[in-house]
């Protein structure tokens, strides 16, 4: 029978979460756990304590449910209803360690649509290895503490560079942090770090190339002349605010400006 996910995100999430189920229900790293906490849990409509899918899935404090839906029996390219079309859902009960349980959800069907049918919900998987959960929780807590310390050490290593109004050459690693539109067009905010760990902040016109913009991270090596605008501090890191860039070279072009 034909099957189609309701959205591409449903399919992508299902594949990721089913991979966790195949891994015993555990995230594969503390980084993956942090990603789900920040990108998936935030904005999730089913954050415990509550229930989901016609009250058939209990969601405790500290848990949340991710629902991936698709249509079975469709005959066209869209998600329109047909006489044989049926909705099917996979409900993943999540916590800070990964997938607690996975359920299959079915629907009640009407002439003009459907709604979840909790009486037909079936639990297909439940995580059982509590010992591993406790071990991973400690390991990941240690990793996060070490990462926090490393970030703090890195921030504290930065010093202010130059005098306000001075033209300086900065050679280092640049990252695009964000962009925004204003009366003058689009402005970009970059953070640049030199070989000594000093941090520079630049807000203004784009200094990355169209080739570099194909990478969503937009991170590149840069050598350019800037004017020191101010000395600032953010989250314990001394930052040299700069403007008026004159590009000398970057990793992609490697040519004189």
Image: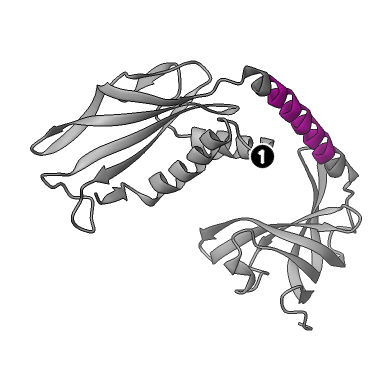
Give the residue drawn at x 51%, y 60%.
Answer: 181
> Along the line of sight, which residue is nearer the eye, 116 or 221?
116
Q: Which quadrant is the C terminus positioned in?
A: bottom right
Is residue 27 toward the left or the right of residue 74 in the image? right
Give the residue drawn at x 52%, y 60%.
Answer: 182
Name, please, the residue furthest toward the bottom: 256
Q: Position of residue 115 (x, y in %)?
A: 21, 30
Name, please, the residue furthest toward the left: 111
Would residue 236 be visible to someone looking at this image?
Answer: no
Q: Position of residue 63 (x, y in %)?
A: 50, 22
From what the image shows, is residue 221 above or below residue 33? below
Q: Position of residue 256 (x, y in %)?
A: 79, 83
From what the image shows, is residue 166 above or below residue 7? below
Q: Position of residue 29 (x, y in %)?
A: 67, 37
Tell me the crowding category of disc 1: few under 14, some 14 to 19, or many 20 or more residues within 10 angstroms, Cα based.
Answer: few
Q: Which residue is mark 1?
A: 31
Secondary element type, mark 1: helix
> Along the line of sight, which residue is nearer the eye, 89 or 209?
89
> Is-magenta flag for residue 151?
yes
Q: Which residues are magenta?
A: 134-152
Would residue 171 be visible to someone looking at this image?
Answer: yes
Q: For residue 148, what is the image quadrant? A: top right
Q: For residue 154, what is the image quadrant? A: top right
Instruction: Please identify the dominant SS of the magenta region.
Output: helix
Give the residue drawn at x 75%, y 32%.
Answer: 144
Give the residue drawn at x 60%, y 68%.
Answer: 213
From what the image shows, is residue 26 above or below residue 72? above
> Along the line of sight, which residue is nearer the eye, 152 or 72?
72
């Amino acid at each position: 029978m034909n099957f189609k996910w309701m959205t591409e995100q449903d399919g992508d999430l299902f594949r990721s979460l089913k991979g966790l189920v195949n891994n015993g229900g555990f995230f594969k790293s503390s980084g993956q756990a942090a990603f789900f906490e920040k990108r998936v849990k935030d904005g999730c409509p089913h954050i415990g304590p509550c229930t989901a899918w016609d009250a058939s899935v209990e969601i405790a404090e500290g848990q949340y449910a991710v629902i991936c839906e698709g249509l079975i029996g469709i005959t066209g390219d869209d998600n329109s209803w047909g006489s044989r079309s049926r909705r099917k859902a996979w409900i993943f009960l999540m916590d800070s360690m990964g997938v607690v349980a996975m359920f299959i959800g079915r629907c009640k069907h009407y002439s003009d649509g459907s709604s979840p049918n909790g009486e037909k919900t079936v639990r297909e998987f439940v995580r059982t290895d509590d010992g591993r959960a406790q071990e991973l929780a400690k390991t990941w807590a240690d990793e996060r503490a070490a990462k926090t310390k490393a970030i703090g050490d890195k921030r504290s290593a930065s010093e202010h560079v130059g005098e306000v109004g001075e033209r300086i050459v900065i050679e280092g690693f640049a990252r695009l942090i964000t962009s925004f539109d204003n009366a003058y067009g689009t402005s970009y905010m970059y953070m640049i770090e030199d070989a000594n760990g000093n941090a520079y902040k630049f807000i203004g016109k784009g200094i990355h190339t169209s080739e570099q913009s194909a990478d969503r991270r937009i991170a590149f090596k840069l050598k350019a002349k800037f004017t020191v605008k101010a000395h600032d501090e953010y989250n314990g890191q001394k930052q040299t605010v700069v403007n008026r860039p004159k590009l000398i070279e970057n990793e992609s072009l490697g040519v004189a400006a």
